[in-house]
Image (cartoon, grey):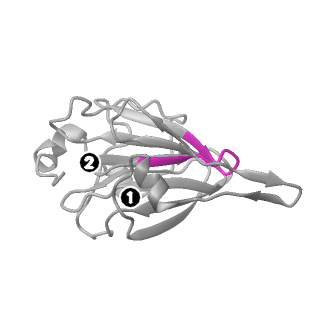
Amino acid sequence: MNILTTKLPGVLIIEPVVFRDERGWFLETYHAPKYQNGGIPLSFVQDNCSLSVRGTLRGLHAQLSRPQGKLVRVIKGEIFDVAVDIRPDSPTFASWESVLLTAENFKQLYVPPGFAHGFCVLSDIAEVEYKCTDVYVPGDEIAIAWNDEQIGIDWPMASPILSQKDAAGQSLQMLVGQLSELPI
């Protein structure tokens, strides 16, 4: 396994070892001791899976009182995956990192607590699985505007398909007061 650091401390790109032969392939998608030694110290308590069509953008999402770390991978299709530092006192506040996750490249993105997460679908459909370090708490989640100018993500699409929640996402600037109370 190869773990790549990014410009955002704690945000990691994982390249698992894939064993291929005439039958197909095999890989470990998670191995707690290896991932902990690689810089992912928290345990995962919830697994999620989504299916989305081309042009869908999900995010940017985070929880306030129970921030989640997420280990994201694609099992079908291709996504442009993004992590945004939303810790107001961080030197990388409002900075973002992206990676192309595909079913073929097997890469994973670790988004630590204190970061917002979002992705857009580049293939006809995409199945995305992710592990979370805390459970989902309805009413605790925030949606940051996908096109927030302060963040300036260079999304590979101009007019994504959004949920009502994501279409109503707030600017990072409007959320700063709430973000200062993140327990991280």
The image shows residue 117, relative to residue 140, as above or below, that is above
For image coordinates 39% across by 46% down, the residue present is 39
**Residue underneath mark 2:** 114
x, y (%) of residue 83? 39, 42
Q: Residues within 10 Å of mark 2 (few under 14, many from 20)?
A: many
For image coordinates 33% across by 43% down, the residue present is 145
**From the viewer's perspective, is 155 left or right of 87?**
right
Task: Count up the numbered dots.
Answer: 2
The image shows residue 94, relative to residue 1, as above or below, that is above
Say which amino acid is labelled 1: Gln
Residue with the most extreme right position: 22
Say which amino acid is labelled 2: Gly
x, y (%) of residue 115? 31, 46
Q: Residues within 10 Å of mark 1 (few under 14, many from 20)?
A: few
Residue at disc 1, secondary structure: helix
**Residue underneath mark 1:** 164
For image coordinates 49% across by 34% down, the residue present is 155
The image shows residue 76, relative to residue 79, as above or below, that is below
Residue 91: say if magenta. no
The mark nearer the N terminus, 2 or 1, is: 2
**From the viewer's perspective, is 5 left or right of 17?**
left
x, y (%) of residue 20? 79, 52
Magenta highlight range: 100-110
**Nearer to the camera, 105 or 16:** 16
**Nearer to the camera, 120 or 67:** 67
For image coordinates 27% across by 70% down, the residue present is 137
The Cα–Cα distance between marks 2 and 1, rounded to whole angstroms, is 24 Å
x, y (%) of residue 63? 26, 58
The image shows residue 84, relative to residue 117, as above or below, that is above
